[in-house]
Each structure stands twice: as structure tokens, then as C-alpha cells.
């Protein structure tokens, strides 16, 4: 019941953000934001209830992982909203959150017994940091999509639907940088804590398991983007495209590896 209520609030927030995007009625946006805040709060309560029902940190099933991912994107966005004014950012972010929470809704919500390797204090530390990193990288992805849409409008010189509704290219580029400077350190810390956990569970820091390999590939993509941005001065379109590619690697690491490749990390499908 808690999760279903959370889903309804997220859906209402997403719908209201789309209504605001197309109507630009200033009275709709705060209502949408309040629905999203309410959804985030109820989602937090839902995760706590799930923890007590399972008896362990709810981050081991497909449902739990995607649900926590949606929660991370929500609070990452809300933390940004309190500091920055990015026009219509919520319109795009709310769709990502709704997509994630819909996937969680249609995933099995059964609570599974933890395998011995997961019965560790490293579980909440590693998994929560890694997925929180994905939350900020998802914001970077949304910013990248918005940048590419706005740039397309400017190149066409026919200012249509997006031009007057999206922020300037400079604002979107700065947004991408901020998401990266938060998400990348968290991603690094997530890999480091995972390595320490692997040493405890399997006796080796790194085994080139498919999940580990794709985590490293994702890290290298974002490390390359950071290097190109700060050392060489990459800005704009290239950064936006790399943010989209990097997030595609995030999604493959989260889902594709589990469904297409087998390894030590494949506990639940």
C-alpha cells in the first residue's frame, strides 16, 4: 500500500510537470514540486518499512534496486532545486523517476533470503553509495538531453517548442558539470567500497566479474569526461553526448549485466 501510494504521487508529479511544461502556467509548477516532495517523503517511509519487513537493507532484488534508484534521483533533484533554478528541469527528471518507479512496480516485490556473501555491513554502505551516484549521474543525463534539444533549436533557427521552455546552453552546461562533480566521486567511492567488500567475501579485491568490469568501464567513461572537461576544456555538445553515453553505461551495469551476463554479482534477476 505504501509503495502504491508512492507510485501515485510520482505519477501525479510527472503529469503536473508535463502540464506546466506545455501550458507554462506558473501556478502548476509549485503544485508539481509539492507532489514530488510528498512522493519522496512517502518513498522514504516505504523503504524504511521494507527494511523492517525484510530484516535487512532492501537493496538486493531488482524491485528494491530500481526503487532505491528512483528515490536517489528524487532527492538528488530536490537537493538541486533548493540551490539552483533550472527552468523546466523537473519536467525531464520526473519522467526518468516515473520510468524507474514503473519498472519497480512491475518487478517482483518478494523478499528473498540473503545469500551468505550479502550478509555483511558492506551491503548498505556499498549499494547505497553506488546507487546514489547513479542518481546524480541521471540528473547529468537529463541535463545532456536538454542541452542537445536546445542546441538543435538554435541550429535550426526556428524557435519552436523547446527554445522558450529550456534554459540557456550555458546554464545546462554548468548543470552537467555540477552533476558530474558530485556523481563521479560517489561512483569512485562505490567501486572502492565494493572492492573492500569483495576482499572480505571472496578473498580478492577484484575478480573481473562482469559487473565489476562494466563498473570500471563506466568509471573510465566519466573519468575521461572529467579529464577532457577540466584539462582540455571540453564544453557543450561533446559533454552532453558523453553524459548520455555514460548514463547508458550506468544502466547497462545496473541491468544489462544481470540479464545478459552471469557472474558472482548475479544473485537476483
Image (cartoon, helix red, strand yellow):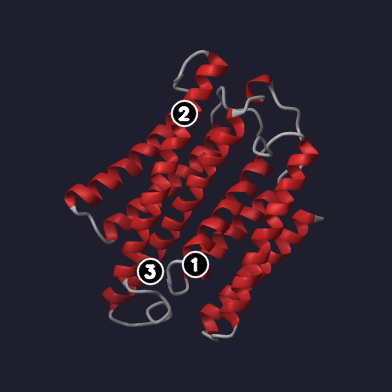
Pick the quarter of the image with the N terminus: bottom right
What residue did someone put label 1 on?
A: 82
Q: Residue 210 vs residue 239: left or right?
A: right
Residue at (56%, 22%) from the top-left corner? 264
Quarter of image, res 187: top left
Could you tell me residue 104's position as x and y percent? 67, 49
Could you tell me residue 70's position as x and y percent? 60, 53
Position of residue 114 relative to residue 60, above or below, is: above
Could you tell me residue 247's position as x and y percent? 44, 48
What residue did someone put label 3 on?
A: 149
> Are the residues at dot 1 and dot 3 in contact (C-beta closer than 8 Å)?
no
Q: Residue 262 vs residue 12: left or right?
A: left
Residue at (33%, 56%) from the top-left corner? 177
Secondary element at tag 2: helix
Could you tell me residue 146's position as x and y percent? 40, 66
Secondary element at tag 3: helix
Mark closer to the observer (1, 3):
1
Residue at (44%, 34%) from the top-left corner? 215
Residue at (75%, 32%) from the top-left corner? 112
Q: Could you tell me if residue 106 is visible in this image?
A: no
How far apart are labels 3 and 2 at the CA level?
33 Å
Q: Which mark is residue 139?
A: none
Q: Count up the numbered dots.
A: 3
Q: Residues within 10 Å of mark 1 (few under 14, many from 20)?
A: few
Q: Which mark is residue 212?
A: 2
Amino acid at each position: 500500500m505504501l509503495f502504491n501510494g508512492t507510485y501515485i504521487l510520482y505519477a501525479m508529479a510527472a503529469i503536473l510537470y508535463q502540464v506546466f511544461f506545455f501550458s507554462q502556467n506558473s501556478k502548476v509548477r509549485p503544485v508539481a514540486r509539492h507532489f514530488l516532495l510528498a512522493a519522496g517523503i512517502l518513498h522514504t517511509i516505504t523503504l524504511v518499512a521494507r527494511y523492517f519487513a525484510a530484516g535487512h537493507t532492501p537493496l538486493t532484488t531488482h524491485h528494491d534496486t530500481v526503487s532505491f534508484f528512483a528515490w536517489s534521483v528524487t532527492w538528488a533533484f530536490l537537493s538541486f532545486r533548493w540551490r539552483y533554478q533550472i527552468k523546466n528541469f523537473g519536467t525531464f527528471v520526473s519522467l526518468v523517476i516515473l520510468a524507474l518507479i514503473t519498472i519497480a512496480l512491475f518487478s517482483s516485490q518478494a523478499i528473498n533470503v540473503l545469500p551468505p556473501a550479502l550478509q555483511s555491513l558492506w551491503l548498505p554502505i556499498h549499494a547505497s553509495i553506488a546507487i546514489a551516484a547513479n542518481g546524480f549521474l541521471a540528473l547529468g543525463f537529463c541535463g545532456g538531453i536538454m542541452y542537445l534539444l536546445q542546441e538543435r533549436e538554435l541550429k535550426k533557427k526556428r524557435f519552436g517548442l523547446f527554445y522558450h521552455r529550456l534554459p540557456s546552453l550555458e546554464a545546462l552546461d554548468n548543470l552537467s558539470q555540477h552533476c558530474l562533480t558530485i556523481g563521479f566521486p560517489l561512483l569512485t567511492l562505490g567501486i572502492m567500497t565494493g572492492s573492500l567488500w569483495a576482499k572480505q567475501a571472496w578473498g580478492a579485491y577484484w575478480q573481473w566479474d562482469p559487473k565489476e568490469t562494466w563498473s570500471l568501464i563506466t568509471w573510465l567513461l566519466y573519468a575521461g569526461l572529467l579529464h577532457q572537461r577540466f584539462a582540455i576544456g571540453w564544453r557543450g555538445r561533446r559533454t552532453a553526448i558523453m553524459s548520455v553515453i555514460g548514463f547508458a553505461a550506468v544502466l547497462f551495469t545496473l541491468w544489462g549485466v544481470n540479464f545478459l551476463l552471469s557472474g558472482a554479482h548475479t544473485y537476483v534477476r
